[in-house]
Every structure is written in C-alpha cells, then in structure tokens.
Image: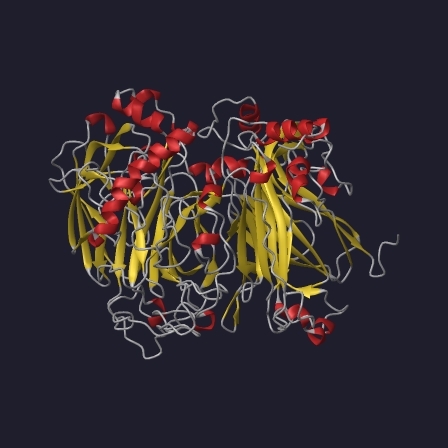
Amino acid sequence: MKPRSAWGIAALVLVGLFVGAWPCLAQLNLMVQCPADTDGIDADGDGNPANDIVCKHITAGDGFVTMADGTVMYTFGFSEVPDGTPPGQVFALRQVKSELPGPTIVLREGQELYLNLTNVGMINRPDLFDTHSVHWHGIPNSGSIFDGLPESAPTVKIGATFPYYYATLGKEGTYFYHCHVEVVEHMQMGMIAHIYVLPRQDQDTALKNSGSPPFVGFAYNDGDGSTGYHVSKALQLAGFDSRFHAQHIAIQNLPFAQLSDDYHFINGRGYPDTVNPNPLGASPENNGHFSQPMDTRIQANQGERILLRVHNISTTHLFTVRVLGIPMRVVGLDGKLLRNGSRDLFYETSSLTIGGGQAADLLLDTTGVEPGTYFFYTTNLDDLINGQQERGGIMTEIVVCPPSGCGV
Amino acid sequence: MRKRRWFGMALAAAALWAIIMEPSAWAKILGVQGTSFQLVAKQDRITLGDGDSVVMWGFALGDGRMQYPGPTLIVNQGDTITVSLKNALPATAGNVSILFPGHDVAASGGVAGVLTQEAPPDGTTTVTYTFTAGKPGTYVYHSGTRPDLQVEMGLLGVIVVRPTNPTPNSDCPPVPDGHNAGPNPSLCTGTKFAYNHSDTAYDREFLMVMTDMDPRVHRLVEFGRMNEIDTTSFFQTVWFANGRNFPDTIANAQVPWLPTQPYNALFLMHPGERILVRMATLGRDPHPLHFHGNHVRVIAKDGRLLSSSSGKGPDLSYERYTVVVNPGETVDAIFTWTGALMGWDIYGHAPGDDLAPYEFVADHGANFPVILPSRDDVVFGLLYSGSPFLGGEGSLPPEHAGLNVGGGFFYMWHSHTEKELANNNIFPGGLITFLGVVPWDVPLEAE
C-alpha cells in the first residue's frame, strides 16, 4: 500500500462521512454520458449540424431554501454540475446545495438531451437511502426506462449516476420535470424544475419578421405566427407545507394526511421576493449557495407580446391565475398548441385554473396597454401568503414600458 | 415510510402476478346492462389500502351486497330506463334518493324530498325513477338526499350510455402516420364508438371513478353518533379509484377479499390501440388526473361531445397530459401509445428485423442511446422487466418479484394533487393506478 499524505487521509475521511455507506470515491459511478454530435445532420434546423446533442449533469441531494418571510426550510433538490467539474469534486461541491426550482432546461426542437443524474445523498438525513429519478412530466410517447417511475424503471442509488435520454422532435412546448421516487415527499421537498422545448419554427426568420416588432420566438409550430412573442417567462407555481419540512429535518414521521401548503411561490419565491432581481437564499444552512436564483419580474414594451409558460406542481393546491389589466389569451395547454386540425381553440380569459400537473401557455398582448405595473397573481386569495405573512405568495409584477422602452 | 411502502407493494405483488397470468382480470368496464334496475341502499363495510375497515352506505343490486362505487349501469341510447330504489339502511340514515344529472327524470312513489322523491328506511317502499337515455356518454348518479353526508358515505355510481347509431366510417384511421400496420379487427366496425362518430372509436374502454373520504365521518356513523357529524369540517385523508385505494386498484376485479369493492383499475393495452377512458369525480375535491405515457385527447364532458355542430365529431377536442375532473363532472378521453419519436427502437430490433405491429418506422433498428448503469447502482422497480425494451426480459436481482412477465411498459395514472397518493399517513396509496402497454404477443382478451 502506498503511503498517503495527511491531507489525503483527511479527504478520504471527509468523503467517507459525506457519502455515508460509500467507503471510497473510486467506487462511485460518476460516468457522464455525452456522445459527440458527428452525424452531420442539422436536426434542430439552426444551421449548425454539430450542436444537436445537449448534455446536462445534475445532482439530486438536499439543502435549504429561504422563504420570503425569512423562514429557512429543509429541502431536497436538483442542482447543476458546471462543465469541467472534476469527478472527484462532484460530491464535495454539490452536497447541501438545493436549487428551487431545479436547473431549468431549455431545448430546441430536434435536439437530443442526455440528462445525467447523480444521487449525492441527503447529508442532513443520513438515515435515508432513497433513490432519485427524473420524470419528464408529460413528454409524449415516453419510454418507461426514462420515465423516472420507481415502480417501472431502475432508479439511481446514492453514489451513482443514471443517464436519461430524450428526443425532442415533435415535442415542442411547456413541460416540467420532477423526481418521482417517494413522489409525494420528494416533490413536496422541492425536487421540481422547468423544462421546455422551443419550436422548430423559431428558425423561420421570415415568420419572426412578420411580427411588429419582429418576434423573438414562438410558443409552438403554429404555421402562422399566432403564438409569436417578444418576451417570455417560465413560471412554476408550487408551495411548501412548513410543518412537513420541519418534521423532516427533525427526523420525525411525515404528516402526509395533514399535508396542506402554507407557503406558496413562483419559481421558489413568494411575493415580494418574486420581483427581487438578485439571486436569493444564500443562507449559512445552504453553505452560502443561492438556493432561489430566479426572479419573475417581467418587463415588456407597449405593443409587445409576453408569453407566460405557467405550470402548477403543488402537491396540495390548484391555482387560478389572473393578470389584471392586460388581455390574456390561452394558446397552449400541457405542451400542446390549442388547435384541432385547422380549428383554433384559443380563447381570451381573465382567469385560468391550473391544477397540479397542468401547464398553460398564456399570451399577453400589451398593445394599447398603458405603461405601468401590472400583477400576475392567484385569485385563490388564501394562497397570497408566505406562512403568516400576508400580501405574499403567488404574485409577481409585469412592467409595461413605453414603446421606446423604460430606459436604463 | 419505506417499510410500509414495500409492504404495500408486496400486497400488490400477489395480485399482479395473477393479473399477468390471467388475462380476463384486466379492467374492462364491469357493470350491469339492461333497461330496468333494482337498487337497494344498504349499509356494509369496505377495506381501505391501509388495512382499515369502514362503514359505508351504498347501492346494491337487489338482494346482493352493496358496493362502492354503486353498480355501473350500462344502457343504450334511446332506451327508457327505469331505476327502482328501496332503502334498507339503518333508520338513523334517514331517507335516500337518487339524482341522474344530465337526464330528465320522472320520479314516483315514496315521499317527496327537496330534490326528488325519496325512499324512507323501511326496506319496502319503492321509489321509481324513469328517464330516456337520450344521448350517449358517461354520467353519474348519486344520492339527492342530504348529499353532503350520503355521497361521502358511498351512495354514488356511474351510468354509461352507448350510442345507437355508430355508423362505420371509411375515414376511420386505425394506423397513425409513420407507423407499421397492425391487427385491429374491431376499431372501425361501429361496435365500439363512444359517441355517434367514427372519431370516437376505441379498442378498449376503462372507467376511472375518483372519490375521496373523511374516515372520521364513517366512524361516527358506525357508532350511531349522528348528531356529532359535521360535514362542514370535512377533511379527506383517503382517495379512491373505482372504489379502491392503491395498491388494491391494481388487484383483480371481483376478488373475494374485497367483496364490496368489485371494480379494479389496472388498464392493459397493446401499442397502437385506442383506449377510451371514462372519468368521473364524485365527492368534495377536483382531481387532476395525470397520464404517464402520453397525452389524452379530451373528447367529451358530462356526456356531451366537444363538437361544433352535429356530424362534425369531436372537432373541439384537445390534448392534455393532466385532466382536472371536478366533483360531479365526467370527462371522456381517448388515449393511445406507440412509442413514436422516441429516437431509439423500443423493441430492440436490428435494422433487418421485422417490424412490430404499429411500430414507428423511422426508429426501426435505431440503437438504444445510453449505457445503463450496473445493477448495483440502481434499484429495480417491481414492474421493471430488467430490460428497457418492450417485450424484453433482462436479468433481475434475486430479491426482485418479477411481476412484469411479458416485458410491458407500465405507466402510472394518478392524481397530481400528490398528497392524494397516500392512504392516511401511508405512502404510496390513494389515487394511483397503472396502465400497462404490453407487446402484441402477450394476449389480451378481446373486448
């Protein structure tokens, strides 16, 4: 046996502590699968035949988030491993670092996604040996091997990595992903994230230029630009039951039957944190990492169209959402253009109920809308709370600027 | 939770083994056909997924035991339907009646109630409800007497009205674009239409009745403490699919150990088949039913086709991956699955192999895209065959129950108000069931 330095032994001890039952880094399966795109085919139609394979490496573990009233809650979560991270650093860097929501994945239709999931364990709950998974919620014609169901697929143990693969051709639209292991618990604990697929039509410059000003993109392959937008935002509606999280970190029985969220949020933040442009949630408990990086303040110039990709992933609540003062048109539901053959089923409304596991694509047209601040919020008024704090929860601001913009 | 979870799965295991071995057990819509039905309200018990036993009030067919949900009444469009009701509940239950939303009902006999004629709890008085089953579709029936309590107690059921004029249509498209042909002898003959239009044709139909329960109410009823029942503080902790909690949902239909819960909810299909899912919610809360595997196409609500005008078929239908079914509402949807556009050959074919029925041709022979981790790195689900391929069978670890004999792909259909996936404090349970897509060489009973 080779002599080891004191540092090396210390590191091994630390790793041993971190990974619990795993005695040695060499036994960890951190193999990330990411084939090169060498087929010469431009599958996403963007003119580059070599960028059609997207590789992601995410971890599943635990951490802490900070609610808008200052309450710190224990969570499970996904976190993205930056490119170039040495395999030996994956555990050390990614443990106790939840992100809420998890890493957003945006794909161009035609791309293939290799999503590598490493289970880094829940270090604050060393008694747990849960596996984790990725369930791409709603993807059409899913294969059960990549569906993330612990009942019908393999799910990955602590210290190992599972490669999920998804082809996106014909699957443009708004989706989300979450862990499906112990699904009530793991979703309530925060293993929830955005994933959406930009339509192939985004490569159609002529159609983009048919907008005034030219569209930035489209929600779907509509063929006529009717889902074109200038500004877009993905909004994840969800909530936490503070008692469940408190029981969890206290290693007590989990109150499934009594579950009812008392904190509600958009992209992990309750109002007014929703409109805070800074990354938030760098609590000492979360190792100083920002746990809630995404704000949801929306800004557009008068005359522009705003696409809201909204989904509800609460484990306990349905939400009815409203935008006060800006006409709202429903153009897509659950990842599908709202159209049957040649018949548009779009409709205008001032409210839409979105149940758990549902998504909607809402187009806001600011033509003729007076510059000012408008609100996106839930009309379930009980859900405008951050725990005991009122005027919070599911609400954010939409700022409409003059046509020339709001300036710097 | 973990130990209980596997205990629950173990319960399911024995049942599921039997299902795979006994094709007659899968969940076609069981019910009673005819034009005249004798229902008797009775008190009995059901078994919850956590092992609890609770008192229920429900509808029985004549001299039979009550069941939860009540008997599914299967009738033909245009028929005059007569439902007679007697009330054999304990006197403390009071009167009972039945409402038939979506139908124009004439009621006679018994005593006048607020909403309709009622049967007092004497076991002999007969109330007769008569209506014409005017339009095809999925309907509910439930108590119209103190429904805040009596629906909770189980006095509810479903009516399926079959269309009388399902004209076969040469446009009927059994093979979607880009797919190999397959055996599909029944789809467009007109015998299996949900409505009078070929776009509502199906190969198999399943029922999904979603209900909820506050067991505290049932205990008060059991012990006769009727004046302590407060239905305004209802807080449900148990959720049902077809009257059962997971994992009982995927046990066989009509098993002797669930005598008052005869219906199951394990759905099996072959790739390319069109599945009609008839959904209904009765109780307090809406349930967002999420379909793993694929979107469904919502074709009707409350027994009315989503159609712009007569003859147009479901031209206002739309696709969803989660369908919210509100209390009292019914939704009909068509589901199909072929594995199209997966990017790999789901059968594990080599390029020169024969195509499977309804195989997506463009993916034929395409390589499986990843190297799966070693068996030591993962936990195999009890419904994983050990192979990623449809019809495949891989090696399984020694402790694995091997439930998926035919190499099917199993998809959870469940409420996405995820808290409803528990039986009281025990996960998993509640509003969970499974769809199994099994290869064509695994026989399923013709429907």
In depth, the one of A273 and B94 nearer the eye is A273
Tell me, yes or no, if residue A393 can be seen here: no
Q: Position of residue B441 (x, y in %)?
A: 27, 63
What residue is shown at x 67% (from left), y 45% (from top)?
Answer: A81
Tell me, yes or no, if residue B238 can be seen here: yes
Q: Position of residue B157 (x, y in %)?
A: 27, 45
Q: List the single residue furthest toward the front.
A: A1
In depth, the one of A113 and A250 nearer the eye is A113
Q: Position of residue A61 (x, y in %)?
A: 59, 36
Q: List the single residue furthest toward the bottom.
A: B170
On screen, residue A216 versus residue A384, left or right, reads right
What residue is shown at x 30% (from left), y 23% (from top)?
Answer: B219
In depth, the one of B157 and B291 nearer the eye is B291
Q: Classify A352 as above or below A214.
A: above
Counting the numbered discs, the total is: 0
In depth, the one of B55 and A20 nearer the eye is A20
Q: List the single residue furthest toward the right.
A: A408
Q: Classify A128 as above or below A108.
A: above
Instruction: Tell me the quadrant of the picture where the N terminus of chain A can be found.
Output: top right
Q: Which scheme is used to colour this image of the protein?
A: secondary structure
Q: Position of residue A107 (x, y in %)?
A: 63, 59
What residue is shown at x 33% (from left), y 72% (from top)?
Answer: B198
What residue is shown at x 59% (from left), y 39% (from top)?
Answer: A26
On screen, residue B191 versus residue A393, left or right, reads left
